Image (cartoon, helix red, strand yellow):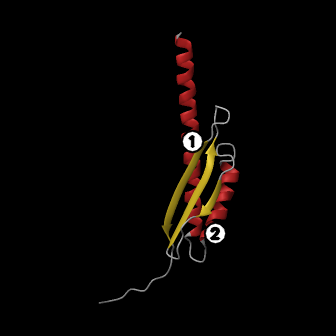
Amino acid sequence: MIFPVLMTLLLAIIQTSMWYFAREAALSAAQQGVRAGREQGSSAAIGANIANGYLAAHAGSVLPGGYAVPDGSTPQQVRITVHGQSVSLVPFWHIGISQTAQGPVERFTTVVNP
């Protein structure tokens, strides 16, 4: 009688770990995209391409179908959002993942003396 409870608890712990790992992979990809997109002369679209490359190289098995988009970026801010689904132990149960990172665009400014 206790065996099904222990197996359910074990599977719940494994599923939570897989969800957390996919979430961290999505955040890492978004941060890589922001780092690339905020360089002077770069753009949010370039940052999204870098994030997609990071997903393909490092998170393909953890976050299948993951993709990055420049979400709400402005000329002063770069914002990258990564969407995907975590791997699930339960068939047909898809856990959505969405992580966002943002940062200011690097640029030269002038100092105004009062």
Kind of element beneath mark 2: helix
Provide the residue designation for mark 2.
45
| Residue 36 found in image quarter | bottom right
Q: Give residue 21's mark.
A: 1
Q: In which quarter of the image is the C terminus?
A: bottom left
Seen from the viewer's position, the closer of residues 99 and 92 is 92
- Spot occupied by residue 34 in the image (x, y as percentages of width and height): 55, 64
Give, as a three-letter code, the residue at label 2: Ala
Give, as a three-letter code, the residue at label 1: Phe
Q: Which residue is drawn at 63% across and 59% down?
A: 68
Q: Residue at x 55, y 47 (%)?
A: 24
Kind of element beneath mark 1: helix
- Spot occupied by residue 57 in the image (x, y as percentages of width and height): 70, 52
Distance from disc 1 to disc 2, alpha carbons, whole Å, reads 26 Å
Count of all numbered marks drawn on residues in the image: 2
- Spot occupied by residue 56 in the image (x, y as percentages of width and height): 70, 52
